[in-house]
Every structure is written in C-alpha cells, then in structure tokens.
C-alpha cells in the first residue's frame, strides 16, 4: 500500500490540510516529528475532515469513491444512495459504469455482497449504514481479492463515509439534538483512534517486513534472522533443528553448554506447538515451527521468562518464522541439487567418463579429483541401500579428508574417497550404527586418475566378493591383500595378470634386466621340479651349490620367505603366469 502516496487526495483538500496534524481531534493530540503524509499514508485522516464538513450526501459518496484507488489496486465502479423506492445511482466521476446492474443492488436485500461484472475478478458492494439503517452502497472492484490490510482500509473508508452520511442527514433537521451530534462526534473520534492504532500497527508491520527483507537480500541466513528478531523484539531469539540442537542464537544469556532435551520431551513439545496456529508459549519461550510444505525443518523461538511479549512480538515472531521456512527450504533444495550432482558424477566415473569433464564437474561440487582416491563398496544384508543406510555409511567414513562421493548400486553403497579406510574401523563404526556386525566392505587399490575408477570399482567388488565367500563373511577386505584371489575371479584381463606378476616378481624381473641374470627362470624351474634341488639344478644345467646361491639371492632381492606356504603359492602362480601367459616378458 505504500505505493499510493497521499498526493492522491480528493481535489478539494488543500496542501495545507494534507500536511497539518489534526490537532482538533479529541484523544489524538500528538507531536510526531515525521511528516503527516508518513503518519497517514493512505490519506484517510485528511479525507475524514472533508467528509464531515460536506453537507451533500451525493458529494460525500463521490469523495469516498474518488479515494478508493488511493487505498490500493481498487476501482470504484458505482455509488448508490437509498431512496423511498430503492436506490439512486450517484452521478458524476466515473461511477456511472454501465456494466453495474442496478436491479442486482435491490437483490442484495440491504446486505453486503458480491456483484458480477465482466472482466472483473473481484467486485463487492459495501453497504453504507447509519443509525436509521442502510444509507447506500459503494461498489468496488479489483484484479484480485484484497488482503487483510486491504479489507481493513476499505472498511475504514466505508465507516467514515457512513458516519459522514449520517451527519449530513441530520443537518436538514437542524441536527435534531445535541446528543445526536455528540454521538456522531464520538463515532468520528472512535474511527480516528482506530486509524491511529492501525497506523502504528502498520508501521510496526512495515518495520518487521523491511528488516527481514534486508536479511534475505543480504543472504544473512539463519544468524541474520535471529539477529533481526532480537533487534525488533529486544528478546533473545534462537533457532533449533527438529531434534532440539541449537543452530543460531542472538541476544544475551546464551546457555553454555546448551541443554539437550530428551527425544520424548522434544517430540511432546513439537506436538503441542503443531496443534496450534501461530506461535505458542511453552514455559519461558514463545515457539513457532518452520514447516514449509508441511515438512518440519526447524524451530524458531524467543526467550520470554518475564512474559513481556505483546501482540507486536507475536507478529514479528510469526513473520520471522515464515522467513526461516523459506531459508531452510532453499537450503534443503540446494543440498538436494548438490547431492544429485555428486551422485551423477560418481555414477559416471564408475562407468567411465571423459577426464576433462569429470575434473570440471568435480570442481563445481567442491570435490578435488586430482588427488589419490579409493573405491569402497559396502554391503549389509538386511539393510536396503536407502537414504538412511547411505547416511550411515557416509557418517562412518567421515574423516578430516574431503567429503566422499557416494551413490547406491542395487543393495550396495559405493564411495569414492580420498581416505583409505583404517583396517576394520569403518566396519566397526557401521556395525555400531546399524546394530549388527553382519556386513562386508571391499576396498580397491589406489586410483590416481578418473579413468582408473572403473578398474578400482571392479577391484572393490572383487574384494567384497572374496570376503563374502570366505568363512568369516563380515569385515573389511582390501584388494591389495587378496594375493592369488586377485586373478581367480571372472573379468580379469591381461593388465590384471601383469599387475599380479609385477607385485610378486617385479624386483627379480628388474634385477635380471639390469644384471643379465636368470633369477626368475631359476625360481620357475625350482617350482616346476617341486622344490627338489637336484632336479632343478639338472634342469638349469648348473651345480647344486649355484642353485642354492641363486635361491638365496632371490630371498634377499625379493624379501620373500620361500618357506611360507602362501608366499610359495603366490610366487609359483606368478612364475607360471610369467612364463605361460606373458611369455616370460621382463
């Protein structure tokens, strides 16, 4: 409404009257340093002076109709005065709109009501009433129905007009009696006092709206909302999440540490507040719930142990709650968008994607793909890979490193994380969170670039498969520790075989290449001969002591214990793969 300044007053109101404080009005004498236009933004006080000095009833209705548009996006379609036979349309101005059906006015039966007009969304006939009954109507239209403030302003204009018509009706009879004049003056003074009260309320409402709007425009967030509410009310303001954890506090006397209510007490408090409309007092607090679209996202409260809160305080708290609801909904939507983008990124990485695009997308969601990563696959029988299970996995793997990328694949959760899980620490944390240790985790080798993610994903799946196929099905398995099992599963290609050979024979292969020796061949013949020194020496056409020397050098260079059963098995398989599949390539 502030967009309709007081210069849109009726033309017979002087500039001097528009700026002069109505000091002759009983009970309203004030000395406000602000311009009168600021105190009377809609010009009703000034209009009232003109209405009550006008003797002609038709002129009173015309003045009121001209002022309708000053109250907001409204238009006066027609004005009527009661006659002995019904109603007479008031001529002049633009009130004689031919679209108004005069017969319809009689059908209203002296009641206020809707009037149908073409191309008008909302049209209403306001009755002008005095002590003797209905005096007439003003028909008002708008492109949309008025809000609460608009209803009040239009009703105030109708009330002033009715009082002025009643006063004008008494003048031909010489005002009848001093008592009637006193009553009319009282009505006028009451209306003016109501307007003064409304002005104060509107000023407060404007202050609250403007303060919260500035917070939103500056991106102040939750802290900005609590600070604004504290400044408006003078009472400490706070925001909690739905579980009772403090998110923001403004004002003095902040508890330290902040008390934490039990789940039962918190739920009972939320139920109590949810059953009421608007802020609710709970002990020393006034509480409002931020529930956009019906979802409880936060709790806004004011500390008021002395019960000093007024209606203005409740109004400010209610409006701040609406701002908080918008802020929390915006935050949730941003979080959901970020989660979706992060999930799409890891899904594409697992399938294989362009590195340049992957780096750019990762940077957009705040993740650094330039670092070394690991792929982790988690499976917990009996727990579907839903949102709660995913959050539990994310919390259990949280470290000081960058937040992992996480997605779901069937009944498994897959992570791409910088931090290599610490042995069974993640498994223990998940077992505690989910209430059962019957789950398995597979961890890949190091991944140096995005194009290696699909391979590491298969490694993590292989590690998980080996764990779940073993006697001890729960726990964490690292692909690095699989040994021979790394090449026994399906889907292993030549690169995987070469990797296995390099892991177990790489030092010997490099030594042979650099010193023109045959230590790998010696180890292969030794295993082929079942560990028999004489047969192996004969196969290599060397002396038995030479064979012993070479085997000792093999132990020293590879740092492997040939007496260990698992080591002998892995070395034997590696020499077979080196000779048969890789053709003995160094």
Image (tube, rainbow, N blue to C red):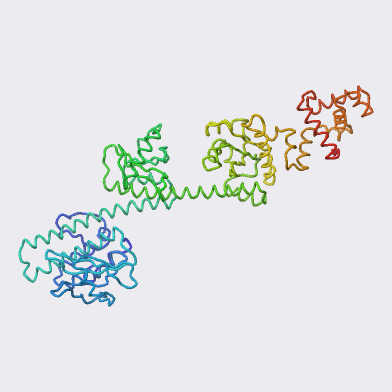
Q: Percent from the top left, x then y, of residue 480?
A: 70, 34
Q: Which of the image's four quarters has the N terminus?
A: bottom left
Q: Residue furthest left?
A: 177
Residue, x 88% and y 30% (percent of image)? 525
- 528 shown above or below 348: above
Q: In this rendering, is residue 162 above or below 533?
A: below
> Viewed as shown, does residue 432 lie left or right of 136?
right
Q: Whole-percent x and y of residue 221? A: 43, 47
Q: Is residue 427 above or below residue 195?
A: above
Left or right for 18, reference 523: left
**Quadrant including the C terminus:** top right
State the residue in front, 567 or 75: 567
Residue 508 position in % (x across, y down): 83, 32
407 horizontally vs 27: left or right = right
Farthest-out residue, top: 545
Residue 151 location, quadrant: bottom left
Task: Count up the numbered dots.
Answer: 0
72, 297: nearer the viewer? 297
190 displayed left or right of 298: left
Rendering coords of residue 21 (x, y %): 20, 59
Q: Residue at x 22, y 75 (%)?
A: 103
Quadrant of res 367: top right
In this view, 367 is above or below 555: below
């Amino acid at each position: 409404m502030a967009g309709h300044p007081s210069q849109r007053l009726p033309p017979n109101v002087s500039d001097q009257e528009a700026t002069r404080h109505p000091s002759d009005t009983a009970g309203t004498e004030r000395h406000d340093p602000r311009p009168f236009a600021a105190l009377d933004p809609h010009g009703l006080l000034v209009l009232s002076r003109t209405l009550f000095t006008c003797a002609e009833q038709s002129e009173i209705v015309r003045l009121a109709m001209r002022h309708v548009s000053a109250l907001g996006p409204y238009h006066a379609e027609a004005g009527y005065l009661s006659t002995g036979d019904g109603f007479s349309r008031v001529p002049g101005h633009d009130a004689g709109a031919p679209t108004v059906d005069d017969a319809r006015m009689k059908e209203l039966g002296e009641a206020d009501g809707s009037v149908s007009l073409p191309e008008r969304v909302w049209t209403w006939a306001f009755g002008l009433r005095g002590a003797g009954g209905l005096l007439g109507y003003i028909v008002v239209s708008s492109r949309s129905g008025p809000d609460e403030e608009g209803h009040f302003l239009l009703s105030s204009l109708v009330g002033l007009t009715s009082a002025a018509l009643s006063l004008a009706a008494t003048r031909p009879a010489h005002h009848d009696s001093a008592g009637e004049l006193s009553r009319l003056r009282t009505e006028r003074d009451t209306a003016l006092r109501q307007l003064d009260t409304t002005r104060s309320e509107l000023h407060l409402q404007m202050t609250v709206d403007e303060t919260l709007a500035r917070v939103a425009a500056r991106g102040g967030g939750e802290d900005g909302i609590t600070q604004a509410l504290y400044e408006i009310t003078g009472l400490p303001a706070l925001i909690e999440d739905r579980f009772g954890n403090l998110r923001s506090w403004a004002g003095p006397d902040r508890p330290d540490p902040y008390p934490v209510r039990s789940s039962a007490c918190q739920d009972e408090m939320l139920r109590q507040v949810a059953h009421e409309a608007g802020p609710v007092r709970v002990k020393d607090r006034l509480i409002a719930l931020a529930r956009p679209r019906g979802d409880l996202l936060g709790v806004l409260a004011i500390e008021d142990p002395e019960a000093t809160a007024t209606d203005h305080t409740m109004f400010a708290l209610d409006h701040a709650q609406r701002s908080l609801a918008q802020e929390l909904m915006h935050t949730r939507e941003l979080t959901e968008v970020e989660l979706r983008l992060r999930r799409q990124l890891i899904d594409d990485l697992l399938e294989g994607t362009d590195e340049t695009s992957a780096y750019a997308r990762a940077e957009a969601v705040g993740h650094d793909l330039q670092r070394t990563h690991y792929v982790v696959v988690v499976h917990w029988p009996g727990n579907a890979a839903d949102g709660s299970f995913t959050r539990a996995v994310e919390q259990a793997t949280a470290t000081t490193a960058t937040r992992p990328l996480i997605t779901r694949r069937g009944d498994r959760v897959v992570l791409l994380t910088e931090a290599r899980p610490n042995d069974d620490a993640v498994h223990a944390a998940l077992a505690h969170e989910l209430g059962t240790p019957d789950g398995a985790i597979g961890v890949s080798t190091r991944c140096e670039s995005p194009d290696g993610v699909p391979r590491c994903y298969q490694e993590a799946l292989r590690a998980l498969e080996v764990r779940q196929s073993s006697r001890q099905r729960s726990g964490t398995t690292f692909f690095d520790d699989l040994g021979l099992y790394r090449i026994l599963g399906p889907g292993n290609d030549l690169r995987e075989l070469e990797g296995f050979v390099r892991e177990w024979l790489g030092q010997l292969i490099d030594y042979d290449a650099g010193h023109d020796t045959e230590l790998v061949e010696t180890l292969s013949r030794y295993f082929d001969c079942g560990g028999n020194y004489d047969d192996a020496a004969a196969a290599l056409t060397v002396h038995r002591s030479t064979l012993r020397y070479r085997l000792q050098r093999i132990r020293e260079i590879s740092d492997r214990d040939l007496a260990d059963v698992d080591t002998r098995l892995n070395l034997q398989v590696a020499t077979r793969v080196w000779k048969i599949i890789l053709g003995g390539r160094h």
